[in-house]
Image: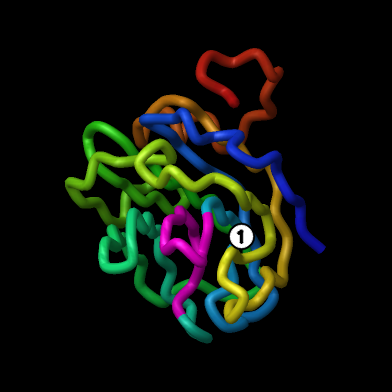
Amino acid sequence: SYVQLPAHIFDHLQVATVEAWVKWDDWAYFSQWFAFGADDQWRAMFINHREGTPFFQFAIYTGHDQLHLLTLGGDLRLGQWYHMAAVSGPGGMRLYLNGMQVDHNSYEGSFAAIGAGENNYLGRPNWKENAYFHGALDEVRVWSVARSGEEIRAGMGQELRGDEAGLM
């Protein structure tokens, strides 16, 4: 199953951090645990694995040929929990695994740069050809700030109160 978030919920965010504890049960074709945007417009933000492999990617599409991509090598195992975090906005894109930065680039866009927040899911892709997420999610968080590696590491094992600054 999946969760559908309200349309346009994050459209205004110029900067963001999306994080969760994620456990994959299989490497289905491009399955996504987080998907935001509109596939028919090639305007989306998502975290998935590539094809049927344990290579992960954090992507922001701002148009058909305008892909901004971060990747993580294939050492991850099925059935194991991992903390994943993706940061976007001023300062560039950053991808974290278990609190450690694994990739970055200089693209400074975030949700607001996509401009198409109609379809927002946890556990389901925006692209019809891609597989639904098969696994488990816990502690999914979206922040309106670019969290640092230190903040991600310090908070990934803590239960939140719900009134933390920047928590969406």
Residue at point 51%, 19% (across, down): 166
Please give left or right for residue 139 compared with residue 18 in the image: right
Tell me the magenta residue range. Answer: 38-50
* Kind of element beneath mark 1: strand
Q: List the single residue furthest toward the bottom.
A: 52
* Position in image of residue 29 (x %, y %): 57, 83
Residue 69 higher or lower than 107, as above or below: below
The N terminus is located in which quarter?
bottom right
Find residue 58 and report its horizontal and vertical position in percent: 40, 58
Quarter of the figure with residue 57: bottom left
Would you place residue 105 above or below residue 140 in this image? below
Q: Which residue is mark 1?
A: 33
Mostly what secondary structure, the magenta segment? strand
Identify which residue, 16 or 77, lies in the foreground.
16
Question: Can residue 147 be seen?
Answer: no
Residue 71 in view in this figure: yes
> Which of these two is toward me, 85 or 122?
122
Camera-side residue of 7 and 4: 7
Q: Which quadrant holds the C terminus? A: top right
Q: Residue furthest front?
A: 41
x%, y% of residue 78? 62, 76
Residue 79 inside the magenta-drawn segment: no
Residue plotted at (37% across, 30% down):
14
Mark 1 is surrounded, within 10 Å at the Cα level, by few (under 14), some (14 to 19) or many (20 or more) other residues, namely many
Vertical order, 33 against 133 (above or below): above
Q: Residue at x 64, y 77 (%)?
A: 131
Amino acid type for the residue under numbered disc 1: Trp
